[in-house]
Amino acid sequence: MGYFIATVDSLWTTFKQALREPTTVNYPFEQRERAPRIRASFALTHDANGEENCIGCKKCENVCPSEVITVVAGKRTSPVTNKGRGYADDFTLNLQACIICELCVQVCPTDAIIMTQEQEKPTFSREGLTLTMDKLYANEKQKRWAWANATVLWDQQDPERGAEKKEEPSAETTSSEGAS
Amino acid sequence: MNEALELLANPWIHGFVFGAVIVTALMSVTAYITWFERKFAARLHSRMGPTMVGPKGLLQPIADGLKMIQKEDIVPRDADRLLFNAAPAITLFFALAVAAVIPFSPGLLASNLDIGVLYALAVSGLMGFPVWVGAWASNNKYALFGGMRAVAQAISYEIPMVLSALVPVVLAGSLSIGQIVEYQIEHGWFAFWPPGPGIFAFVLFMLTALAEGNRIPFDIPEAESELVAGPTTEYTGIKFGLFASAEYIHSLLASALGAALFLGGWDGPFGIPVFWMLLKTCMLFVGVTWIRWTLLRFRSDQLMALCWVYLVPGALGLLLITGLYVHVRG
Amino acid sequence: MAVAETPPAAPVTPAAQATPIAPVTQVAASTGPLVPSGPPRDGPIPPIRAARTPRTDCKPTKAFVPEPHLDLSTYEADADLMTLSLGPQHPSTHGVFRVVLYLDGEQIVKAVPYPGYLHRGVEKLCEKLMASNITPIIDKNDYVAPMTNEQAVNMAFESLMGVEVPVRARYLRTVLAETQRVASHLLWLGTFGMDLGGALGGGTSLFMWCFRERELILDLFENLTGCRFHYNTHTVGGNRHDVPAGWPEMLHRTLGAIDERLDQYLGMLEHPIFSARTKGVGVIDADLALELGLTGPLLRASGVDHDLRRDAPYHAYAEVDLKVFVEDAGDCWARSKVRIEEMRESIRISRILVDNLPPGPICSTKPLKMVGQHKLPPGQVYVGIETPRGELGTWLIGGGANKGSSPYRLKIRSPSLHACAVIPYVLPGCSLSDAIAILGSLDPVMGEVDR
């Protein structure tokens, strides 16, 4: 008899669940709002004058735990300021082994490498998952940037950061759909 | 026209035509039952279920069938090829054969056997054995475990199932399902009248039908988390599909049998009889599905204990009470 | 092991307590040599500090049985027993794990676990990586509760380097650890339901619901760190991401909803089938648990009142009144009960702490601007924290490669490995179905077992 009552009780529980609207979304056609801080893919940025931010310092290459970043450093004259400065002659990021740890963004001294909120499309070839320099600069234009860059992160982690400086830059939390 | 009807009166042609109609209908209904079950389970899980193939995923069963036919048919090297290949077909045959005596409406049945109840229970009880044959033939330890459990369960639960199905037989005084239904139309559904043994026998029958159909909480032969896929571990492609559809058909026909034996079959207040029969069957099947997606699974020894300690004595007691009632009624 | 074998010697000296560095560290007292062959650096290695009173009320353990099994002499080895290789590809081993079962019918006569299929050499890899790079790698160990992995290894670094963590970061870490505990236990509850109820049944309903709630917690973490799973949000000396605006409210909303829905699911777990499948199944008595070094919910379900969060408070646990749940039965049911109560308690603590989140910096070291910024001094330290699975210990010897930025040795004491050690002792005598229930109730994470 205990079995019977408990079974009816459980059936009632599942029935109540069945009355709820589905929590999942019809994925490729609808997409959930993602958090502003979400990090998915990478981009390289330009500064206000249209010049590449990357100076080829190789800090990201050195910090990368899974060693997926390759930077070929070069030195050229800048077309904007007409002064010699460092450039990345080539910049490759292999997404196959990337663990999205954000450390390259964290160490970048010029905010050159940032992460984007939209991920790369699935591909059929290994080459498709290698972000070349062209793709990274294209991502700057095409994809929404994530919240973090080195300046923001350093500011957050500043040991001197007082209580009065606590206002947040931009990050508002996304609403969590299921929690209503 | 008359000639055609006369032709149909020939039992061979009648059986063939209605058999073809019912088998075709059953196979397509079974396909859409999988769609229904997926959608239903998705609702319980806050998911959406199939959405991609056709509107609301309505073409999903067809896609599933095509996929199963396309899949590579793997026969393990050490398997007994003959039995391994034959088992799915035999299982499906026994599952479909039950349909021969299920009356969907006064005229719509393949064969009005005088011993319809006996036939239905006997044939559906046989379903456990080709499963075991397939499990043994596939030469896999998990499959062997599943097959042994399936046979143990089929043998054990056959007894309370037959005993509980005997209650309407005793009440109506006939082994023909059609006559049982007609008796119910006259005297009231057995699930509710006479009050007492009918409703308990109905619950018992559906419970054992759950067990015979390998549905949770009695699905120990398949027991995905323990035995990977039980008897069907080594089966791929359409052979697996035959096993799966046999299981669905078995559940569906057990629901139909329950509706015919206890809920008055095609009896309804208005409209065409076949509608009421299908409605009752579907309601029972929804109940079975609902239970499936709600409960956890028994352990095999607990399952056997439940059968032999509670269900068999209970069913015998019910039969005794029913017999006394019929004796007193005269 | 550490708990059981700890001799009650090594009293806590005032000097040890007054050690200036690493107030959040607790260390198991040990007198034996703990150094691998050859010291890492010149000079003496400071002894491991003792900050926690070792347990003295442990009973003497049973005679150790090297190969536990039923009486094998009643069987003819070639004829009667059937070996069944449960895994490495099996739906219920929770990862790539293999248990060879010797079966007499459905009854298990002997069980031999074979871990190691997921060995990735993380400890060796850490000897090459620098301190800042280890955090995202160590995330992958216990892939059900990555947050606590990060915390453990970073606490070891902080302890060795003598870095103090700001109050805000300590509160934040506590909130994250407790929220992660809820997420981890939710995943356990779902998979346990799957083990008991199959992939096509009520277990899956439970599993889906638990995953739905867990997704809410992952949303929380996504809003805070930008990643749903492998966060890399801790760093030496604090956290990398501060709380965004609106996050505490979101946490309240999420945890409130989970707390509410938990009641519904527990109603389903009160079903007699659940009791029948779990009560009296897989009993681990307290002696065996202590002998094998079980920690966390497994130990507490066996009746040993031991929780590092309360016994050796780290983070901000000293500032909350933490209730520890202990069950005496030691069976699958007790383990479920302990975890479920822990979930509720974690929800409560998180909500209190996030309300009292103090202002201030979240990191006490300079932000990471170049690789090798954090130098690990020579010396060794052991830090143990209470993850959802038990005591996750990190034993760290500093001063390794990369001019001292890498550890000389980083050893992880994973609670899941010890949980797997209990399998040969508990499984014999059970049926195959029970074995699945027991494996599910142990809740091992293979990434952590094999590392």
Image (cartoon, helix red, strand yellow):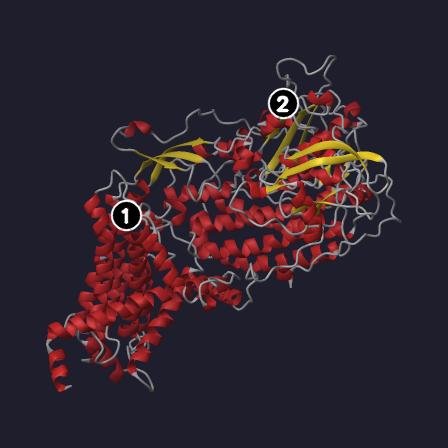
In the displayed structure, C234 sits above or below C44; it is below
Q: Return the x and y of residue C171 as percentages of the image width and height.
A: 76, 44
* Residue beneath the point at 73% across and 28% down: C51
Q: Return the x and y of residue C333 as percentages of the image width and height.
A: 50, 47
Q: Secondary structure at mark 2?
A: loop
Q: Residues within 10 Å of mark 2 (few under 14, many from 20)?
A: some
In-image side of B232 versus C255 (left or right): left
Which label belongs to residue B147? 1
**Mark 2 or mark 1, which is nearer to you?**
1
Q: Residues within 10 Å of mark 1 (few under 14, many from 20)?
A: many
In the displayed structure, C166 sits above or below B116; it is above
Q: CA distance from mark 2 to mark 1?
A: 53 Å
In-image side of B11 versus C256 (left or right): left
Q: Is residue C308 visible?
A: no
Q: Return the x and y of residue C220 as percentages of the image width and height.
A: 67, 52
Figure quadrant of the N terminus of chain C? top right
**Both marks 2 and 1 on one chain:** no
Q: Which residue is mark 2?
A: C7
Figure quadrant of the C terminus of chain C? top right
Q: Amino acid at mark 2?
A: Pro
Q: Amino acid at mark 1?
A: Gly
Q: Secondary structure at mark 1?
A: helix
Q: Nearer the viewer, residue C268 or C8?
A: C268
Q: Nearer the viewer, residue A4 or C158?
A: C158
The chain letter under disc 2 is C
